[in-house]
Image (cartoon, helix red, strand yellow):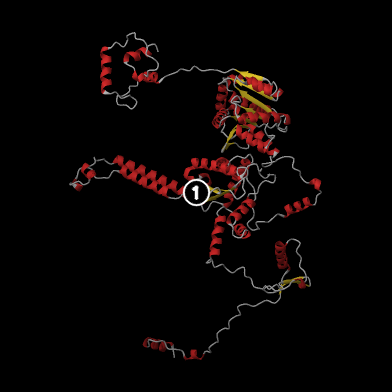
Amino acid sequence: MDGESQQLIADCFLRTIVDPRSTNAPNEPPATKQPVKVELQVLRLKDESQTLIMDTLRAIHGESFQLGDISKYEDKGGRMKKGFWQDRGNLIIQGGVDFSNIPRTGNSNEDKFRMYAVMKLHSYAFHRSHCEEALDHHDGDVDKALALLFSKYFPSPSDLQPPAEDHNEDELCTLRADEREVLESIYDKLFVEKEHNRVWQLKFKIDHLLTHSPSEMKKQAEREAQQAAEEKRRMLEALAKKKKVKREKCWNFAKGKCRYGNRCHYSHEPDESDSEEKKGSKKADKTTEEDPNWFFLEIRFPPGNRYPFERPILLLKTTCSDIPEQLCLRVNRRLVQECIELTNDGMPCIYAVADLLQNDAEIGQFIEQDRYQFPDGRRSLFYVPEQDAGESGIGENLPTHHQRGVTGRQTGSKVNPEQVMKEDRNIVRKFMDKQTNDAYKEMLRNRRKLPAWTKMAEIINLMESHQILVISGETGCGKSTQVPQFLLDDWLLQSSKLQSKEPLRHVEIICTQPRRLSAIGVAERVAEERNEKIGNTVGYQIRLENKISSSTRLTFCTTGILLRRLQSDPTLTSVTHIIVDEVHERSEESDFLLLILKELLFKRTDLKVILMSATLNSNLFSSYFGDIPVLDIPGRTFPVEQLFLEDILERSEFVLEPDSQFCRKLRKGEQELLMQELEYSDVKAANAAPAKTIKDENLKMADMFARYAGK
């Protein structure tokens, strides 16, 4: 059949003609199913695979693991019968089934709880594999797993001694309760006690950390673009309004309805100012309703924790999803360091840590400089580097005379002398650069006007020749602000004359004040006179708050703070000068401090002490310390004028209204009597002054004039 005939048949028949040859094709049988599981009897591995498996076995069983003979492996009822053995020097593995890839269903309560627990631990920026390992290690106890992760990621310094057992649980609970009340009064709703006396939480909006979030930076750029477009639109509308002739508003339309409608000659446009205010209020409501990206500082007190004499568990988390986990860990590490420094002295540290978290400059500098390596997520949480393990093994084999003995209580992190020397040189350099500053020169001119400035050279000479000195100065002489600066400036000037390779003498000055307000006020004034920010070279430390840093060399504190520091460091190792201000204000703390200082001067001959007192009791303190020299600084007084309320009203020409709340109400009889006295009586008559027991409000006009005529 040719092609034309096939085309004609296809056009006539609706159904396609079947080719008879296709029916003769044989039907192939269906393929047989492959076996689901084939057990490998013997598997021979390459040398590389054998090395990897041996490394895995040694990681599980220890570095000393070696393969034994097949007879050492017995069937213990498992499915891995005689799993592996050594034959002719090669590793041989018998077939088995791998159950590690079987997915969890997630439907059971245990799986749901585990999933929630891992998510909670991971929210604190810990690695997910470490969270699972810590949770398995403590059999699902979230609190213990969190404490384990905190100890591994933020280990305590090696030389940190355990806290003393001087305080019982009731005293510790009282101290925490006091701090909790202070935090509640400061932060209000931002502070929450999630678990009584166990878990606290502070809530912050920290903009300088949100700059590390790509999504937040993108939103910020979009907001700035919208604001620019909105300002441009408003400018164009303002220009259009100026060109457009403005018609007067229709009062009928403003009241509700104008009967003239579109034919009205007045404007029916709505008030744009009201609409803009409504739009602005709606936008403000939306912004307040939207939940911003918050940072949460969580403070945990595990059982047995002796805070404020021991660091608590500090954890930082955020609701911003794309903040880098390493960033949160590094910020948390800086907060833990600050907490350790304060708790070494038994100081409550939560407010100081929260204030540090919001300090943009210090946190940013620490993030840039910190190079600490956190535990690797690819390794076990309990992984110990080989070099550390080797060093510890060597130390264990040494004789007993190589063991380190405890010669005294050592707390706090080790002070690196090289770092301190570098910081001292930096302080000296900044001080010399400041000499050409106009603001500093102006402050220096004001300081020269104080009476204490004339005694600067004499004070420095006496301190070089004596270990203790009493300075007696009247009020207003400038002893509280100038004497600490004399010591600090003398050290800076002497250090600036040294060569770059010569070692610097380290100086740390502590000045005590009887009250917290005076410590803060004097510190801020001294920092202002030195033209620097509080917390740099000059700082203060009071209960629940401190403004000090690694570059602080002059610290103003209360007497109780110094006593608390003496508990942790009885010899005040790093302190070179102690100034006790207002020592004439006798109290139990100040007298106890003088008693300790008198004993400490015999142990530390390099320690210098200055007692600053009023003129009354200076000889008493001099005789107590063995007739030490007394330096008198004259004070200066300023003219004081007393002004009473009547004088102020007269000078300001203020007139009291009859119906004012400050005027005494007169009854009808009193008002008539007053009018009669004003009309008929001679108020200038030479009457005798009334008795002092009679109040002014009960005097008549003549008696009032007689009482105050000569004043």
Q: Quadrant of residue 659?
A: top left
Q: Quadrant of residue 58?
A: bottom right
Q: Helix, strand or loop at disc 1?
A: loop
Name which residue lies at 77% across and 73% down.
Answer: 71
- Asked if residue 631 is positioned above or below residue 330 in the image, the reply reads above
Q: How many marks?
A: 1
- Asked if residue 3 is positioned above or below residue 645 in the image, the reply reads below
Residue 432 visible in rendering: no
**Left or right position of 45 against 533:** right
Q: Position of residue 470 (x, y in %)?
A: 65, 22
Q: Residues within 10 Å of mark 1 (few under 14, many from 20)?
A: some
Residue 57 visible in rendering: yes
Name which residue lies at 55% across and 26% down.
Answer: 438
**Left or right position of 667 against 474:** left
Three-letter code for the amino acid on which mark 1 is drawn = Trp
Of the pair 84 and 646, the residue shown nearer to us: 646
Q: Quadrant of the C terminus?
A: top left
Which residue is situated farthest in the left direction here?
Answer: 259
Q: Position of residue 561 (x, y in %)?
A: 61, 35
Q: Quadrant of the N terminus?
A: bottom left
Of the pair 585 and 201, the residue shown nearer to us: 585
Q: Position of residue 74 (x, y in %)?
A: 73, 72
- Asked if residue 634 is positioned above or below residue 157 in the image, the reply reads above
Q: Which residue is mark 1?
A: 294
Q: Position of residue 519 (x, y in %)?
A: 57, 31
- Asked if residue 276 is positioned above or below residue 142 in the image, the reply reads above
Of the pair 247 and 396, the residue shown nearer to us: 396
Of the pair 629 and 526, the residue shown nearer to us: 629
